[in-house]
Image (spheres, rainbow, N blue to C red):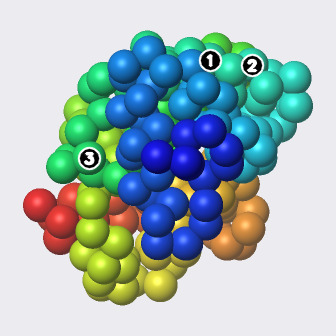
Amino acid sequence: MAAHHGTVPTGDGREADLARLLAACARGDKSALRALYDAEAPAMLGVATRLLRRRAVAEDAVHDAFVKIWNGAAGFDPARGNARSWIYAILRHRSLDMLRAQSREELTDTPIDEEEPLPSEDPEAVVARLSDRKALRHCLEQLAPGQRRAVVLAFVHGLTHPELAGRLDVPLGTAKSWVRRGVLSLRECLG
């Protein structure tokens, strides 16, 4: 496999190569981790920077994510989802943990919606399990346009609820509601 001694190619073979790199990491192949880092770290840094708004903190999040990827690579199962989603779910979880730790006081001042909280399963875990992009696209197309934009901006582009509200020009509660309802609808559609 040439892919884990260089960069991961783009296109249709990218997902398979990422999965192979994760399998090689699970076997302790440090060159596979290096190839994975070289291929994904720049984009991961962009996502983390958007979430955390400070490059140094974002770099820490990416580093921590790669430690978790290395230590948890044996837990990746390509039958349950694609490798890229799994990698970015780890980064997103770590970034959100860091964001919560940084702004715990700010978060307590945020108004709480009257709606029920999300069930205990993380939306990222749902997305990480997906193996069929067509199914995801179909389910996204079933969402109302506002919900679809909110979900994509939140989970693909890493926007926070306040950023979503500003970008979509809606109240904060509406942005939160669109994401929550969109994720629940996607879970139902994909389940």
x, y percent for residue 96: 58, 30
Residue to which mark 3 is pinned: 78
x, y percent for residue 102: 72, 17
The residue carrying pointer 1 sits among few (fewer than 14), some (14 to 19) or many (20 or more) residues within 10 Å by Cα, namely: some
Q: Nearer the viewer, residue 58 or 183?
A: 58
Q: Quadrant of the C terminus?
A: bottom left
The residue carrying pointer 2 sits among few (fewer than 14), some (14 to 19) or many (20 or more) residues within 10 Å by Cα, namely: some
For numbered disc 3, what is the local secondary structure? loop
Q: Indicate which disc, 2 or 3, sits on the residue closer to the N terminus.
A: 2
Q: Quadrant of residue 137?
A: bottom left
x, y percent for residue 94: 56, 25
Residue to which mark 2 is pinned: 60
Q: Viewer-nearest of labels 1 and 3?
A: 3
Q: Residue lying at the far left in this picture: please name it.
A: 191
**Alpha-carbon span between mark 2 and mark 3:** 27 Å
Q: Is residue 25 left or right of residue 154?
A: left
Q: Nearer the viewer, residue 139 or 30?
A: 30
Q: Identify the residue shown where x is 25% and y is 75%.
A: 135
The residue carrying pointer 3 sits among few (fewer than 14), some (14 to 19) or many (20 or more) residues within 10 Å by Cα, namely: some
Q: Identify the residue shown where x is 22% and y is 59%.
A: 187
Q: Residue 64: which numbered mark, if any?
A: 1
Residue 23 versus residue 18 in the image, above or below: above
**Alpha-carbon span between mark 1 and mark 2:** 6 Å
Amino acid type shown at disc 1: Asp
Amino acid type shown at disc 3: Pro
Q: Viewer-nearest of labels 2 and 3?
A: 3
For numbered disc 1, what is the local secondary structure? helix
Q: Indicate which disc, 1 or 3, sits on the residue closer to the N terminus.
A: 1
Q: Are marks 1 and 2 in contact (CB under 8 Å)?
A: yes
Amino acid type shown at disc 2: Asp
Residue 72 versus residue 140 in the image, above or below: above
